[in-house]
Amino acid sequence: MGIEYIYEPFSYGFMVRSLIVAVSVGVMLPILGSYVINRNLGFMGDAIAHASLPALVLGLLIGTSVVIAAFPAAILIALLIGYIINKSKIGEDTAVGIIFSSLFALGFILLSIFKQISLSVEDLLLGQILGVSTFDVLSTLILAAVVVITSVTLYKQFLFVSFDPIGAKVAGLSVKLFDNIFLVVLALAIVGSLQSVGIILVLSMLITPAAAAKLIMKTFPSSMIVGSVFGVVASIGGLYLSYYLDFPSGPSMALTATSIFIIVWIVRRAISYAN
């Protein structure tokens, strides 16, 4: 009976599609989350997700996929935010806050204007991974592959620029170029995760598994790998909660990730006291 509870959900096609997307999201977000934590870019990830709302609305208006609609917009927004951060004198958080709050508000204005759009605000904000289509699965897999391959290929450059930008510049690396590449990759990962965990909760899956891994791992590469493992566990755990308890999928995944973080923190504290 116990084993049936494990495989029963995946006897349905929609759950198999959800599983593939969940694993993809669980892998790619924490990989970038490790960099985001060390570079204090958490607010940036949140801003990209929120600021993509107008593009999502316009995309649905012309009848295209959520991913296709948000893809170019998220990249432009990420590069725009990066540019403003470098050029603005009002402060990073202020500049990012102005952009994402304005575009997020614009998205809701567009929703109120184009009432014919069949878009659930709850699904948009909190995610609905159980409703992904075959096209969504393929697009998410492609985005995840691009994110992982780019992160592995440019690992040394990303690491150097993240931890020692001045040293990277002295060594001849184009810090601005690799910053922009990282922002584009981050935008891709966020776009690929919007339908799974939604605009509001994407930051949770980006940050929390990576933060849990950072608590227990001593090296950056191992932290990235373990963070992805935690991300996958959180994503699959959220799927089971959503299937068996009828919880919303995005919040279930986010709370599972938080639970993992709390458990890791408690275990680490207990080991520290024991030693």
Image (cartoon, grey):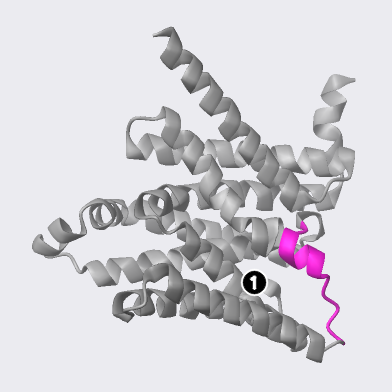
Point out residue 119 in the picture as x, y percentages from the top left corner.
82, 75
Nearer to me, 177 or 7: 177
- Give the mark count: 1
Residue located 77% across and 83% down the image: 111
Nearer to me, 238 or 147: 238
Residue located 43% across and 28% down the image: 216
Point out residue 33 in the picture as x, y percentages from the top left corner.
46, 50
- Compared with residue 117, is residue 121 higher up or lower down, i.e. above or below? above
- Compared with residue 178, is residue 30 higher up or lower down, i.e. above or below? above
Residue 127 inside the magenta-drawn segment:
yes
Extreme-bottom residue of the structure: 113
Extreme-top residue of the structure: 274
Amino acid beneath label 1: Val
Q: Which corner quadrant holds the C terminus?
A: top left
Question: For mark 1, what is the residue?
Answer: 67
- Compared with residue 131, is residue 266 higher up or lower down, i.e. above or below? above
Q: Which residues are magenta?
A: 116-128
Point out residue 66 in the picture as x, y percentages from the top left corner.
69, 73
Nearer to me, 36 or 99: 99
Point out residue 141 in the picture as x, y percentages from the top left corner.
60, 58
| Crowding near the residue tagged with mark 1, few <14, some 14–19, many ≥20 C-alpha atoms within 10 Å | many
Q: Is residue 166 left or right of residue 205?
A: left
Residue 197 inside the magenta-drawn segment:
no
Residue 226 in view in this figure: no
Residue located 53% across and 61% down the image: 189
Q: Secondary structure at mark 1?
A: helix
